[in-house]
Each structure stands twice: as C-alpha cells, then as structure tokens.
Amino acid sequence: MEIKLKGRSVYKGIAEGEAIVTQEALSGWGGINPDTGIVIDKFHELYGKCLKNKILIFRGAKGSSGWANTFHICRLRKTTPAGIIFTELTSKLCLGIIVMKIPAITDLEKDPFTLIKTGDYIKINGNNGEVTIIKNK
C-alpha cells in the first residue's frame, strides 16, 4: 500500500530509505555517536539504533547548539540520516538540517506518527514537499 502526503519543505533534495520512527525529541551532543550514527542516549527509545541512511521521523531536536555540531560531524563521516520528517521546528533543528544538507519536511497534512512505522519505506521529495509511504507488510 502506498500513501502520498504533502508537507512543507525545509531543505531541498530527494531521499528514500527505511523509516526509523520516534515520537521523542533527539539530542545531538551526547545523544548520537557521530562516527557511527548510532543513538547513544541510554534514556532514548532509539538507544543502540543506527540512523545512517534511514529516513528519521521524529518530533524534533532537544538540547543545546551542540546538535548542529554533532550532525555536521555526522555529515563529514557520512553517518547522517538520508532525510528527515519532523513535527516541531526549532532553531537548533534548522541549523542541524543546514549542516547535514539532507532533505527535510515538516507540517505534513496528516500525523506522521499514526501513518509511518519503523521499517516502512519512505520517499521524500524536498523540492516539492511530497512524502510517499510504502507500508511494510
């Protein structure tokens, strides 16, 4: 089954990959290992999971401006998510998106947390704000 949604593009580009979903905000500094892309925050539901080349669906960023620094290092190490869909826009998240240089979409017409599950295949078109969800059977 394929579901198409419109949202607001925050960073242009096209990406696709397996979804990794959390309704929790994510910390950069101390939350992610930039060398591996693995979540290292022991209190986060994605602890031990790798974000590299995935489509990250999450609430947004938490913590300090270290968020942008961590994800800049991720970009240099090629451990960033392929793209992101999020629900809460903050300045630290904007900085992170800019330094990662990956497609990002927010303000989807439907709640992404009710439609997308970890393992679904996602296509993001940051040029026009379209998201395609291919449900994992």
Image (spheres, rainbow, N blue to C red):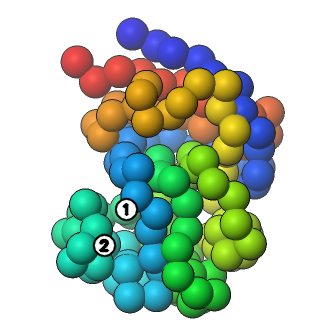
Residue indicated by mark 2: 39
Front in this rendered view, residue 98 or 106 = 106
In the rendered image, is residue 101 in sight?
no
Residue 132 in the image: above or below residue 50? above
Residue 31 in the image: above or below residue 8? below
56 vs 11, left or right, is: left
Residue 118 in the image: above or below residue 61? above
Q: Residues under labels 2 and 1: Cα distance?
A: 8 Å
The mark that comes first in sequence, 2 or 1, is: 2
Q: Residues within 10 Å of mark 2 (few under 14, many from 20)?
A: many
**Which residue is found at the position 37% from the left and 51% from the top?**
22
At label 2, the amino acid type is Val
Residue indicated by mark 1: 51
> Which mark's residue is nearer the viewer, 2 or 1?
2
Q: Where is residue 95 drawn, in percent x and y?
A: 72, 75
**Which residue is found at the position 48% from the left and 80% from the top?**
28
- Do the residues under discs 2 and 1 have CB atoms within 8 angstroms? yes
Q: Where is residue 2 drawn, in percent x and y?
A: 46, 13
24 vs 10, left or right, is: left
In the rendered image, is residue 84 in sight?
yes
